[in-house]
């Protein structure tokens, strides 16, 4: 069996499309210790969340994917089941319609994972929104929605997970390079991701008492629907890539490897860390 996380990536990848895209042909580390563990991935209907779910299932992890768009999630789960159909020992992937702003819904999601698979080991707080408005025009609704999805969603997910995890459990949150670099027109998003970074440290300290690790990944520009606006505008793309030392977008597959590392036993002494996976853009 060859483990690659190449095909079926939402929004990727044709190297000939434009110079910012790369073909996602990566051999990923297998992490056999993950087999038979149980994971919840939020925002798994598309983009990076779908690829995290796929990568975990290929390694024998049973996955509950959750997304606010229940239909999208069901299509993604069914696609992932097909994709892994020929992989010996692949885990199950089931989908659930969940709005991460709803604390009760996240509790129910965690309980579903536990009831269905008998344990809960991994929780990826990946769902996020990326609204745009100049500072003077950010509405109350936009700010509240952004903080609610991107920050409250992470807290409620971590609470639901921690209540059901045994020592050894691992939570990973999706922060962003935007937590440490200002992006014009994205103040709501930037400030929400700064909160996610610090919340990760707070969670790591308190949940460390129970042997649960909490880390975050801070991606730069990754090739998903969320960055379609820049990918479809050559001038904006060139400007964005000027601020990336590696001069290209990241592919979702390039976030999968670091995610697996943080979830794996290789990182069992790593907690409260925000891992930049950004082509160096946090330095520019
Ligand atoms: N793409 C990037 O360049 C980039 C960079 C840094 C950080 N991130 C972060 O990574 C994460 C994944 O991003 P992506 O690029 O795959 O995004 P995406 O927009 O492709 O996917 C996000 C998913 O989250 C779901 N979602 C949105 N609100 C939700 C809610 N309230 N409850 C449940 N699900 C909800 C969406 O339906 C969607 O399926 C996000 O947290 C994002 O902020 C992305």
Image: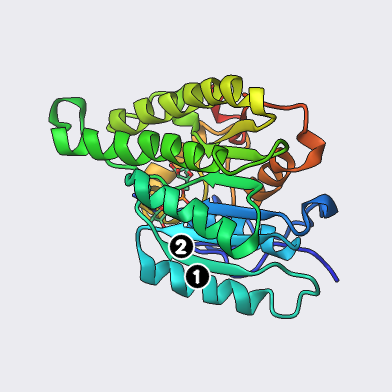
Image x and y of residue 235, in percent: 38, 45
Residue at 17%, 32% (x, y): give it: 138
Image x and y of residue 25, in percent: 72, 60
User: Label 2's element?
Assistant: loop
Q: Which residue is under mark 1?
A: 76
Residue at 62%, 42% (x, y): give it: 165
Residue at 54%, 68% (x, y): give it: 94
Disc on res. 45: 2
Q: Does residue 239 appear in this view?
A: no
Q: What count of labels does the image hold?
A: 2
Residue at 39%, 40% (x, y): give it: 153
Q: Is residue 212 left or right of residue 139?
A: right
> Which of the 4 quarters of the picture holds residue 151?
top left
Image x and y of residue 118, in percent: 65, 58
Q: Residues within 10 Å of mark 2 (few under 14, many from 20)?
A: many
Depicted 77 relative to depicted 203: above or below: below
Q: Is mark 2 within 8 Å of ligand 1?
A: yes
> Which of the 4 quarters of the picture holds residue 274?
top right
User: Label 1's element?
Assistant: helix
Calculate the distance from the C-alpha at mark 1 to the C-alpha at mark 2. 5 Å
Image x and y of residue 181, in percent: 44, 23
First of labels 1, 2 by sequence position: 2
128 or 204: nearer the viewer: 204
Q: Residues within 10 Å of mark 1 (few under 14, many from 20)?
A: many
Depicted 241 relative to depicted 70: above or below: above
């Amino acid at each position: 069996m060859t483990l690659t996380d190449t095909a079926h990536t939402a929004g990727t990848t044709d190297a000939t499309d434009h110079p910012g895209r790369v073909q996602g042909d990566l051999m990923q580390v297998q992490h056999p210790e993950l087999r038979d563990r149980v994971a919840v991935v939020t925002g798994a209907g598309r983009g990076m969340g779908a690829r995290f779910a796929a990568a975990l299932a290929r390694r024998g992890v049973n996955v509950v994917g959750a997304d606010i768009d229940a239909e999208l999630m069901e299509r993604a789960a069914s696609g992932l089941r097909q994709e892994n159909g020929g992989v010996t020992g692949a885990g199950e992937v089931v989908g659930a319609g969940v709005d991460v702003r709803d604390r009760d819904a996240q509790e129910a999601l965690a309980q579903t994972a536990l009831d269905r698979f008998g344990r809960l080991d991994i929780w990826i707080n990946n769902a996020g929104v990326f609204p745009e408005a100049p500072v003077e025009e950010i509405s109350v609704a936009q700010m509240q929605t952004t903080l609610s999805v991107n920050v409250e969603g992470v807290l409620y997910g971590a609470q639901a997970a921690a209540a059901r995890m045994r020592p050894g459990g691992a939570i990973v949150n999706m922060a962003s390079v935007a937590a440490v670099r200002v992006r014009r027109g994205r103040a709501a998003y930037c400030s929400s991701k700064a909160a996610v970074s610090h919340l990760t440290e707070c969670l790591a300290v308190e949940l460390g008492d129970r042997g649960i690790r909490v880390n975050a990944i801070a991606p730069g520009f990754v090739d998903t629907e969320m960055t379609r606006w820049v990918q479809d505008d050559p001038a904006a793309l060139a400007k964005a890539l000027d601020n990336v030392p590696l001069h290209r977008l990241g592919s979702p597959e390039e976030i999968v490897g670091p995610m697996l590392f943080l979830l794996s036993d290789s990182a069992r002494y790593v907690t409260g860390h925000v891992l930049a996976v950004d082509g160096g853009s946090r330095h520019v």
